[in-house]
Image: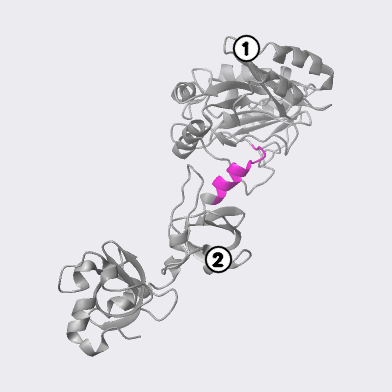
Amino acid sequence: MRFRIGHVLPLGYDLTGLFPAGPAGFHDGALVPIDVGLELVRAMLRDHGAWCRLEVEGAFTVHVGWDQHLYIGSSRPCEEALTRTRALGLFPERLDTSPYDFTPDDPAYVQRPADADFWARLDWTVSAHRAVFLEEAFGANASRWHRLTRDTIETVRSRLAPRSQLAVWPDLLTDIDTAVAALPDKGLVEVIWEDQDGHITSTVVDETQFEAATSRLASARAGGVVSMYAGEDLPLFTAVLPYSDGVLRARWQTEPTPSDRDWAFLKTLRRGQVVTGRVTTIASFGVTFVDIGGFTAMINIPELSWRHINHPSDVVSVGQEITAEVLDVDMVRERVPLSLKALQPDPMLDLARQVGQIVTGPVTKLVPFGAFVRIEDSEDGFEGLVHNTELADEHVERPEDVVQVGEALTVKILEVDPARRRIALSYKQALAVAPERHRHA
């Protein structure tokens, strides 16, 4: 039913968030007593009429719209209510759905819940930044701020209002001059300051009030300025508090931060999934970064190839499109390691079938405990170790007493361990089997 109302004010609150629990509110789906509900509706119409909502899931809905109309929905038949309404001289209209129901600006965007992953990320963020600020919004234009440290996270968490929207911001500036300098020439900003007693206050001001805001910041212990315009000064990440059953019943729509968008994308990934992306950067420290649907994943050098490589550019190049396997999805650090080699057969498995064979290859490196020999005819061929005990029948102090780097050596393949990436070779056993092949290229 929709009724025409003769009074409405420009501000509005979602009363489902302002009255979250207790005998006059909602808790785990409990109904609001009729007399309390009526008083809340009166308050909605009298004080904060536009875009107010009073709801009990599956039972009833009261919405005050921007056009001075009231929508009332009920899970029970409304014939008696219709009759009484007409008797009052009002004009009810039957509607299947509320025209003032919540419609997100981006239907594809899913608000992040303040779940275990969120709190783990928040804890990690606090550890990395030492302190951050949490903005708790429990209604339109109604919020409070909390400084978070490792010691205060759980205390603050226990006091948050259900259905609140949470926004995590960097710590306030202790350099007040820098905070004041952040005030623009004009526009709408939110000024946050922490007084000498640790109390945190915020207010929204425009250029006509900047002088008063500067005065407040001047006496503060720390402060900050946040633009109220979309796309400017986004928080680190946001979330909405679910109920104890883990269900999100609050309906908020905010501009998603880069971290929020990353979270939404990460929720679509799973370990072992095959993804396609484009190489964007090859870092100086060897990590390859790949864009997979707007998120930057990474490939460490060992995951580029089953064979030894000196640099990622031996395998990939910037701009190249590649297909890789997701090794893990780290929701806390928002990292996704990929593997290029996981989608390729391990050539060492073929080599394992050659155990016992005699092969010849160059000595590539000498170490105190033996010599490495490349046993495949290619620059990136696998190398195996000839331990000092397998270089000669007599005791060998130093491998260079028997062989030199670059020298061709005939060896017997003793063992191939693909899991540990190890190949064991023997020169003396090869010599015993085929002495005529002793040291030839």
Q: Which region shows up in magenta?
A: 253-265
Residue type at mark 2: give it. Ser
Q: CA distance from mark 1 to mark 2?
A: 54 Å
Specify few, some or many for label 2: CA neighbours under 10 Å numbering under 14, 14-19, or 20 or more: few
Which residue is disc 1 drawn over? 195
- Please tell me whether mark 1 or mark 2 is closer to you in this view: 2
Q: Residue at x 25, y 83 (%)?
A: 357
Is residue 49 at all visible to an observer of this figure?
A: no
Specify few, some or many for label 1: CA neighbours under 10 Å numbering under 14, 14-19, or 20 or more: some
Q: Residue at x 54, y 54 (%)?
A: 297
Which residue is disc 2 drawn over? 313
Measured as percent of width and height from the top left, residue 195 is found at: 62, 12
Say what secondary structure mark 2 lies in.
Answer: helix
Where residue 398 sits, quadrant-wise, is: bottom left
Where residue 393 sits, quadrant-wise, is: bottom left
Residue type at mark 1: give it. Asp
Q: Quadrant of the C terminus?
A: bottom left
Q: Residue at x 40, y 73 (%)?
A: 345
Front position in the image: 287 or 291: 287
Question: In the rendered structure, which disc, 1 or 2, sits on the residue that comes first in sequence?
Answer: 1
Measured as percent of width and height from the top left, residue 217 is found at: 70, 15
Measured as percent of width and height from the top left, residue 266 is found at: 52, 50
In contact (CB < 8 Å): disc 1 and disc 2 = no
